[in-house]
Amino acid sequence: MSRAQQFQHFFKITKIRMDSISIKSAEDIAGMRIAGKLASEVLDYITPFVKPGVTTEELDRLCHEYMVNVQGTIPAPLNYCPPGYTPYPKAICTSVNDVICHGIPNAKALKNGDVVNLDITVIKDGYHGDTSRMFFIGEPSILARRLSQITYECLWIGIAKVKPGVHLGDIGHAIQQHAEKAGYSVVREFCGHGIGKVFHEAPQVMHYGKPGTMEKLEAGMIFTIEPMINAGKKEIKAMPDGWTIKTKDRSLSAQWEHTILVTETGFEVLTMSEGYPALPDFIKLA
């Protein structure tokens, strides 16, 4: 197995707590609601700063200060170190253009036409809130705008499937169908994940698959859905820094992410805030 094939969203899947799926208590759910909203509010805060000429390092600094000094939260990625990795050195992940995920903030200025995913995870009172959004720097290309929109739709198509009794494979299949119908590909090596007081836990939430396969959803489960969709082929390339993952063919990639609670009748999105982008027309939240 190649190194690229061993990557599984921030951790090597076989070495992190993936033995059983936890059903969250009412206390856990209340804590996760707070953490999720705070994570989304970091993205609300940083939005005006995401423009041509800013560096991802500066965006990281601003987010870090906001998290620590304003919210009283802890940036979960900072010094995060799964087995076999070096500690992640920044407070957020900034994935630009052909970077699929885990891009490390640096001193290179963003320029007109770039696209960037900002991935935020905060810890509040022990609970993790995890979310990401796509941002356009100046005026994006038609391709970049369409890829981001299709990926956003993939996220919400997956979310709309969530309710007790549904299989995780049903979610992945719906996402894969939408992406591939548009002519795009779904990254295979990375997935959504269970989350709570532990950053990454069971289950794995694949963004491709077959209906009726994998675990069946139960009320009280909390996990992320975070499709990574490439404009070109699905193959990936791991960079020498040990974290950054790019498209092998250098095509653009996009990602959107939410943390989801399975309720008795459907789902609750835990990572919403006042500044969140407009929902797709086919989604109606209670």
Image (spheres, rainbow, N blue to C red):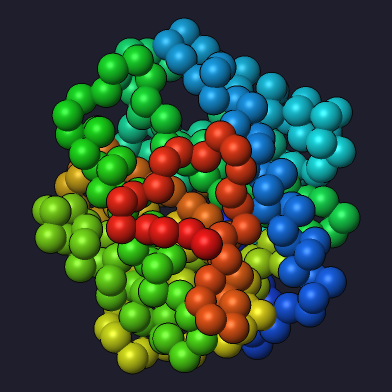
Number of numbered callouts drawn: 0
Q: Position of residue 70 (x, y in %)?
A: 83, 29
Tell me the residue at 81%/36% (across/down): 71
Above or below, 128 relative to 114: below
Which quadrant, please, contains the N terminus?
A: bottom left
| Left or right: residue 63 compared with residue 163 | right
| Left or right: residue 211 compared with residue 4 | left
Above or below, 173 relative to 268: below
Q: Nearer the viewer, residue 257 or 218?
A: 218
Q: Position of residue 245 (x, y in %)?
A: 42, 46
Q: Residue furthest top?
A: 53
Above or below, 179 relative to 250: below
Q: Position of residue 227 (x, y in %)?
A: 38, 57
Tell me the residue at 79%/79% (across/down): 25
Within the image, what quadrant is residue 264 found in?
bottom right
Within the image, what quadrant is residue 75 found in?
top right
Tell me the residue at 33%/63% (across/down): 157
Q: Residue furthest front?
A: 286
| Left or right: residue 102 compared with residue 246 | right
Tell me the residue at 69%/23% (across/down): 61
Q: Nearer the viewer, residue 275 or 225?
A: 275
Residue 262 visible in the shown view: yes
Residue 55 visible in the shown view: no
| Left or right: residue 127 compared with residue 96 | right
Q: Position of residue 103 (x, y in %)?
A: 50, 38
